[in-house]
Structures are given as C-alpha cells and as structure tokens.
Image (cartoon, rainbow, N blue to C red):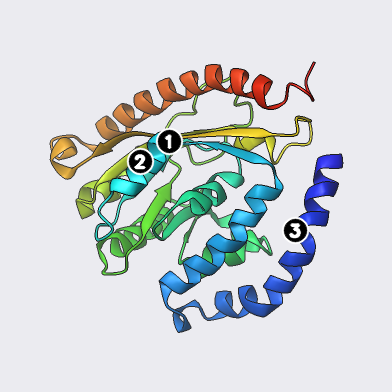
Amino acid sequence: MFKYVRVVLKILPLLIIEYFVWILPYSINPQKYPFEKRFKKVQKLITRVVKAFNMVSYDESYQKFIDSKDPNRNYVIFCNHMSFMDPLYFISRSKTPVTFVAKKESAKYPFVGRIIKILDGEFLDRDDNKQALKTFMSVQKKLSSSTKMDIIIFPEGTRNKDPLNSEVAPFHPGAFRCALKTKCPVLVSSIFGTFRASNGKYFAKYNPIRLSCIKVLEYDDIKEMNTEQISEYAYNLINEDVKKAKEFDSVKMRLLNKKHIN
C-alpha cells in the first residue's frame, strides 16, 4: 500500500495538471495536432510515471534494435502481456513514435483511455469477431500509411495473471494477419517485470524490467507461412525468452533490493 501512496504523491498532481492542459484537448481532437508532437508529449509524461514506479531498465537488446532500425519503416511489434504498464514502458523506451492495440474496456479509463486516443491506438473487442476484424484492418491501414509509427500487439489477448508460475498464454493467430498483409517488418519481443508495479502484493522497492528484442522478421522470412505458423513460431521464441527472463529476474531482484529483501 505504501508504494501506491508514494507513487500517487509523486505523480497525481502532475497528472491532474497535464490532464486539463493538454491530455483532454489532445484526446478530444487528436488530428488537430501532428502525431509526432502528440507522441513526444505523451512520452515525456509516461517516462515520469515509469520513474515513479522505480522501474530499472535492462533492455540492451531492445535499445540496440531501436538505435539501428530504419526510422522510415513502420514495424509491428508482438510481445507477451503482463500488466497495463507494458505499453507505457514501451512508450518510455522508444526513440520513434509507437502506439498499440488495447482491449475495448481501456477506453473507459480516464488516463490510459485518453492516452490511447491521443496516440491513434486501437480498441479491440475480444468477444466480437467482426469488430476485431475491423480493428486489425485499421491496424493494417496505419502500418501502410505515411505516418511513421510502430504498433504493439499483445497476441495473448489478455495479461498473464500469474507470470511467475505460468507460461505465456496461447496466442491468437489472427493478430499476425496484419504482418502478412502489410509486409511490414516484425519485431518479436518479450517483457518481464512490469506486473510488480501494478500489484500491491509485491513490496520490493525497485522493479527490474527486462525488455528484449528477440528477433526481427522481414516479410521474406514469413511469406511462405500462414498466420497459425507465424503465431506458433513467435510464441515459441517469446515463451523461451520469458523463461530466461525469470532466471534473470530473481538475480536482479536480489541485487537491486538487497537492503529491502531478506
């Protein structure tokens, strides 16, 4: 409970001010403002939120990818899902604009919902196949547009509620259709550690976050595969990397919190 009090004291006044100064008007009429400007405003705020949660970054492979990627190409990023902090962490660590696909319920959240709208994100109804198809068609359109943005998709469809004791949940193959349709490069990525920031049962002061660039797939690497095969391939890569992350996590937790953990 104390960590939430600390975070609230650090960022709530800032969020209230920012909400009325630019979050509200930007979310009501996002197209009035250039996308890159919107992203920079969001990123600056999100970086402060991430810092308030004492997240310590271990993402050398992801940053190497960011430094070497072609800024003139739109990438589609597939990653496992552990917390509502996952996309926020991606935003804080990116050097080029990024948005994401979120569950439709997120649209009702006063802060996160508005941020998604500002970033031209998509809301997905997991129980409505027709709506889901429209969502991914919109994703395809954005990936093929001249607007420079990467799009994060969490193919599990929901967050893993027991990340320390369970494997990555099965992927929805349909999520990979946009990669084939747009011929955009695919980043297969994994994330681990964000679940502690949003869960009161974890009391450690510092949260090590491991964000990995596992593999970049060009269209030629997947053009002979169907969505089920791509999904299975990406799942195996991510699931194995998450297993490695768990071993890494226990060591980093001890090192970072040796004064806070017995």
- Per the image, the residue denoted by label 1 is 60
Name which quarter of the figure residue 217 lies in.
top left
Q: Quadrant of the N terminus?
A: top right
Task: Tell me the distance, in whole angstroms, between the alpha carbons under discs 2 and 3.
Answer: 30 Å
Image marks 2 and 1: residues in contact by CB distance under 8 Å = yes
- Per the image, the residue denoted by label 3 is 11
Q: Which mark is residue 90?
A: none
Q: Residue at x 44, y 52 (%)?
A: 94
Task: Tell me the distance, in whole angstroms, between the alpha carbons under discs 1 and 3.
Answer: 27 Å
Label 1 neighbourhood size at 10 Å, few (<14), some (14-19), many (20+)? few
Identity, as a three-letter code, of the amino acid under mark 1: Glu
| Residue 38 percent across, percent down from the top left | 49, 71
| Residue 2 percent across, percent down from the top left | 86, 41
- Residue 252 as seen in the image, left or right of residue 75: right
Identity, as a three-letter code, of the amino acid under mark 3: Ile
Residue 65, compared with residue 36, is above or below; it is above
| Residue 162 percent across, percent down from the top left | 63, 26
- Residue 127 as seen in the image, left or right of residue 64: right
**In front: label 1 or label 3:** 1
The answer to which of marks 2 and 3 sits earlier in the sequence is 3
- Most extreme residue toward the bottom is 32
Q: Disc 2 on helix, strand or loop?
A: helix
- Per the image, the residue denoted by label 2 is 64
Q: Disc 1 on helix, strand or loop?
A: helix
Label 2 neighbourhood size at 10 Å, few (<14), some (14-19), many (20+)? few
Identity, as a three-letter code, of the amino acid under mark 2: Lys
